[in-house]
Structure formats: structure tokens, C-alpha cells
Image (spheres, coloured by chain):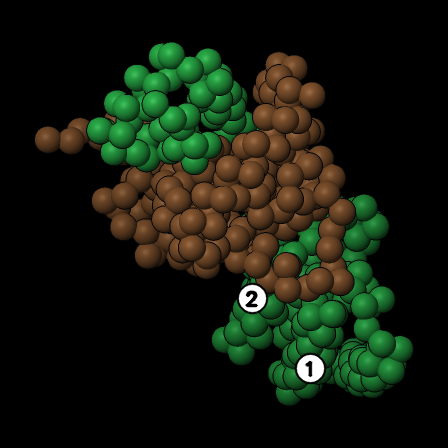
Chain colours: A brown, B green
Amino acid sequence: MTTLTDREVDTGALVARARKGDVSAFEALYRANAPRVFGVCLRMAASRDEAEGWSQEIWIRVWERIGTFRSESRFSTWLHRLSVNLILDRKRSDARRADRRVKMESTWTEQESFDQREDMLDLKKAVDQLPDRARTVFLLYDVEGYKHREIAERLGVAEGTVKAHLHRARRMLREALAG
Amino acid sequence: MRHATNEEIQDLADGRIDAARAQELREHLEVCDACSAELRGIEELKELAMGLAVGSDPPEGEWERIHARITGVTRPMPSRASGRVPAGGFFPLRRAAAWALLAVAAGGGAIVFGSGDGPAPAVEVAELGPAQSVDAAYAQSVYDLELIFEEGASQLSPETLAVIEENLAVIEEAVERARAEIEADPGSVALARSLDTLYGAKVRVLSAAVALADER
């Protein structure tokens, strides 16, 4: 039999209250999970402004859709998937606006205080230099833990294409780190 | 035995290869420095990549902005001069506009937004008169849409921009007239409804303008 931790019980109670429109419960969920959501946004965005826009939009959507959350899955997992789905939607629509390309800037500044290891900083810089699709696939697979099939479905490409992007990203990163 | 392909080594590192072939590859790796170095390089990169999965403090004031959108009552916010509008946030703005219309139609405004330099205090709309409620309900939506429109205006052709500005000017003129009439009769529900209609038109024009700029 599965037992729930105190934190899971607390989260479950907060979700139940938020589903009934309790804003203070929703705020508690926000406070507990906002760094994780913003971390994903920063990793996937081309700029900090873009990450901030996504993060706010994600939380509005969480509020709108919290009624659809099924308690058999973990809230953090549901939130992470909702976040990534929204980010990919936004990246897809941005890609259609060819004249609105954003120059890539480093989005890691906020995260650097968490880890000042030199190799980690080098990796962050190298990730920023990857082509957008290779970067997205690398982050989804090697950082966010998505499977090839899931990434293929979300990006609307074949699994083989995902694999090719991943291999390319890894090769480029290893070359950058070795150089 | 032949060298493993790069794809096979990647699959081995990812655990995406059947047991029999994995065993063959591992036997090869024991005697092949090149292939074993390749596998080690990928595994080191994967391990390093896991370290990227860290959280980060959200932007200052994010909860206050979210709170304003989901409840319609603002908490203290930065002034317009210092506030930043996040890029890519058109969806919640449209939601806010739609919500504002609904809130007024339901008989009570909800958003309250300060007009001075300092932060706006949260005020219950029930304390306000009908026209003030309309002002309050639309303030945040119009404010956000205006800022976004200003940012995206350069994407529009001069002709399109002129049409949009002309429309906004007509609406603004009508709003001013309605306000003047409301000053003379502050309790009038009919005048408040007129103001509501005008603000609704302004939100629609601004939303359309933002969508146009967004498509460019």
C-alpha cells in the first residue's frame, strides 16, 4: 500500500481548497512551486523577459485548470507537464513569427548562485549556443526527464528526429566543453 | 568485433538498447578505448546536465500580478513608469479583458488600479459607485493592453496604425464625454453602462491591435 508523506498530504489539501476557489491555498501552492516553474522557464526561454511572461501565464493556466488535476498523479508532476506544454506551445507560435526572432541571451544568471562549478557554467554557456530545436530536445530529455516518444509527440516530429537532435546537441556540447 | 556506432553508444548510455546487444557492446567496450571513451563522455555529459535542473526565484511581484488576474483585486504593484510587462503574455491579457467584461456585466467591477506614482491600495469595489466600478474593472486590462500595444506598434504599417489610433481617439472622446455627464450625475447606472460599453469597445480595439502586431 502506498503511503503519502506529510508534504504530499499538505499539497493534496491545498489543491483541494484551491479547486474550490481558495486563493490563499493557491498562493501556498505557488510559493512552494514557483522556483521550480521559473527554473524550467529560464532554461527553455531565449531571454529572461520571455521566461517571466511564460511563468506568469503558466500560473494563470494552473488556476484555470486546477479542477482537471487528478489526485492520483503528483501535483508537482502535473504542474511540470503543464508548464512544459505551455512553453512548447509558445515556442511553436513564436517560431511561426519569423520576423520576431529574439536574440539569444543568457538566462542562467539567476541560477548561477545555485552552482558555481566551472564545468556547470561552461555547460550553461554551451547550451545557450545550441540551435533552438537541439537545445529544446536536449533540455527536455537530459534535464527535464522526458522520453523520446513524449518529446516527439509534443514537438510534432518523428522519434528518429528527436534522437538526431539529441545526438547533435550532445556532440556539440561535448565539443564545446572539450574546447 | 566491429566498433559500435555512435547511435548504439548513445542508446546504451540512455538504456534504450536490448539486453543481448547491450551485452555485446559492453564486451566490445572492454577492449576498445575509442568506444569506451565515447560512452564515458556521454555519461559525464548526462550527469552534468542533471545539475541544470534547479529552481530559480520567480520575478519580484509575480504573485501580485497573478493574484490581480485571478481575483480581480490588485495588491500593491509597481507604478507604470517602473513596471515591466513580460513578453509573450498576450493570453492572460485577453483573459483579463474578457474577465473584466464579465465582472461588469455581473453587476460589480473588481479590478482596482492606482493612477498615481505610488502603489495602489487594494480596495473592495463594493465601496465604489457604478461609474467608478466600471473604471476599476477595466483599468488593468486597458493598462496592460496599452503597454503591449505600444511595444508592438512598430510592427504595424503606418496605415494600420493610423486606423487603430483613429478608432481609439473616437472612443477616448466618447469616454471623456461620458465622464463629464457622470460628474453631473454620479449615481446614474445608465451612464455607467454607457461607460462600460465604451471601455468594452476600447478593450476590443486594443486586443485586435495587439493580435495584429503579434502576427507580424
Element type at marker 2?
A: helix
Q: Position of residue B18 (x, y in %)?
A: 25, 33
User: Which is in the foreground here, disc 1 or disc 2?
Assistant: 2
Judge the density around disc 1: few (<14), some (14-19), many (≥20) Cα neighbours within 10 Å: some
Element type at marker 1?
A: helix
For badge 2, the amino acid type reads Arg
Q: Which mark is residue A40?
A: none
Q: Which residue corresponds to mark 2? A: B95
Could you tell me which residue is drawn at 15 percent across and 31 percent down?
Answer: A2
A163 or B76: nearer the viewer: A163
Q: Position of residue A63 (x, y in %)?
A: 45, 53
Q: Which residue corresponds to mark 1? A: B201
Nearer-N-terminus badge (1/2): 2
* C-alpha gap between disc 1 and disc 2: 16 Å
Q: Position of residue B70 (x, y in %)?
A: 52, 56
Which chain is indicated by disc 2? B
B172 or A74: nearer the viewer: A74
Q: Answer above or below: position of B39 versus A18.
A: above
